[in-house]
Image: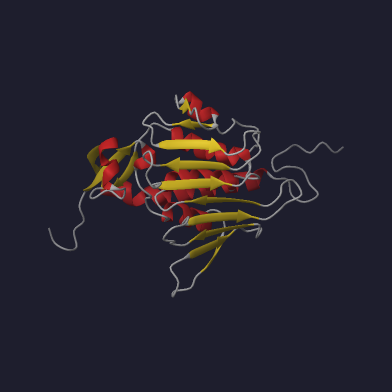
């Protein structure tokens, strides 16, 4: 095959359970936030980090490699409805789970009236833990818990083998909107495998026996266009919500004029 030719298919691994699929491509989160959500970014070519600020300047997402810390951190300033809050995610947190959180955050039509964070896990048959107020995944490697028995404290998601260093953690401050945490736990409980480029896994070798890995040949165009389709879908969602908003001092677009 010449250098100008491109393969018709590429090798893709589908990994289950999804919490052991590895981090994935950060662009799955950062590109839609910028292109579809209007988040602005700061760039310093000498520093390996990404900073994205929401259009209203109330939320700041930082992606920065940290040897022993969380790679992703989102901080939101206080509003009249809610005190300041934060969420953070380790390097190996699958980007699809983080994207479920950020997609809900940037949804103009999002409603706080939704399932409690534990409910998607209970429906997926996660089991209560005897020593903590939490739920554990069927394979025993993921634990979701709220660290206050009164139900008002922060949340923590930990993926690890017993007595081993965590593979990744997600942490949500006590003031984080519950519906955003629920979107994360819904994505976490989803039984569908996650796609990853064929090749070595990005999880510790000690966990490899716990995953199911199915390799398929997928059309190259489909793989290359997945991110673009995601951007278009989120941009269309934002545009539809804007179109439904009434102009200043007027009625919603398309609504009949009741004036006589």
Query: How far across and how far down the image is residue 171, in percent?
Result: 53, 47
Pick the quarter of the image with the C terminus: top right
Judging depth in this view, the residue of 61 and 109 nearest the camera is 61
* Location of residue 212 in the rendering, given as x and y in whole percent from the top left corner: 27, 35
What coloring was used for the rendering?
secondary structure
Q: For this view, does 25 lie left or right of residue 177?
A: left
Q: Is residue 63 above or below residue 217?
A: below
In the image shown, does 226 or 155 lie closer to the viewer? Answer: 155
Residue at the farthest left position: 1
On the image, the x and y values in percent for residue 49 come to 46, 65
| Residue that sits furthest to the bottom in the current view | 46
**Residue 17 sits in which quadrant?**
top left
Rendered-image quadrant of the N terminus: bottom left
Q: Is residue 203 above or below residue 209?
A: below
The mark total stands at 0
Q: Which residue sits at x=47%, y=52%? A: 29
Using the rendered image of the protein, determine whether residue 94 is visible from the camera's viewpoint: no
Q: Locate residue 205 relative to residue 34 in the image: left or right.
A: left
Q: Is residue 176 among the parts visible in the rendering?
A: yes
Q: At x 53% / y 55%, what residue is drawn?
A: 73
User: Percent from the top left, x then y, of residue 255?
Assistant: 72, 38
Instruction: Give the camera-side residue of 62 and 42.
Output: 62
| Residue at the image point whose x is 21% and y is 49% from the top | 8
Q: Residue furthest right?
A: 260
Horizontal side of 171 relative to 48 (left or right) equals: right
């Amino acid at each position: 095959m010449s250098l100008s030719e491109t393969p018709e298919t590429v090798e893709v691994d589908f990994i289950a359970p999804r919490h052991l699929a590895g981090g994935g491509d950060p662009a799955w989160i950062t590109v839609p936030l910028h292109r579809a959500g209007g988040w602005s970014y700061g760039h310093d070519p000498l520093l390996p980090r990404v900073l994205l600020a929401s259009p209203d300047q109330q939320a700041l997402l930082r992606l920065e490699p940290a040897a022993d810390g969380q790679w992703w951190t989102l901080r939101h300033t206080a509003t009249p409805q809610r005190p300041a809050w934060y969420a953070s995610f380790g390097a190996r947190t699958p980007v699809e789970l983080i994207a479920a959180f950020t997609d809900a955050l940037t949804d103009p039509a999002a409603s706080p009236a939704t399932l409690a964070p534990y409910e998607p896990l209970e429906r997926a048959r996660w089991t209560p833990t005897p020593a903590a107020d939490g739920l554990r995944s069927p394979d025993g490697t993921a634990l979701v818990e709220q660290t206050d028995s009164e139900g008002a404290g922060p949340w923590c998601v930990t993926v690890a083998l017993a007595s081993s260093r965590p593979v990744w953690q997600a942490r949500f401050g006590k003031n984080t909107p519950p519906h955003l945490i629920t979107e994360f736990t819904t994505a976490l409980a989803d039984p569908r495998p996650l796609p990853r480029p064929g090749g070595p896994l990005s999880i510790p070798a000690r966990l490899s026996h716990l995953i199911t890995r199915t390799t398929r040949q997928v059309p190259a165009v489909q793989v290359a266009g997945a991110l673009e389709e995601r951007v278009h879908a989120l941009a269309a969602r934002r545009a539809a919500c804007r179109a439904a908003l009434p102009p200043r001092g007027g009625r919603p677009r398309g609504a009949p004029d009741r004036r006589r």
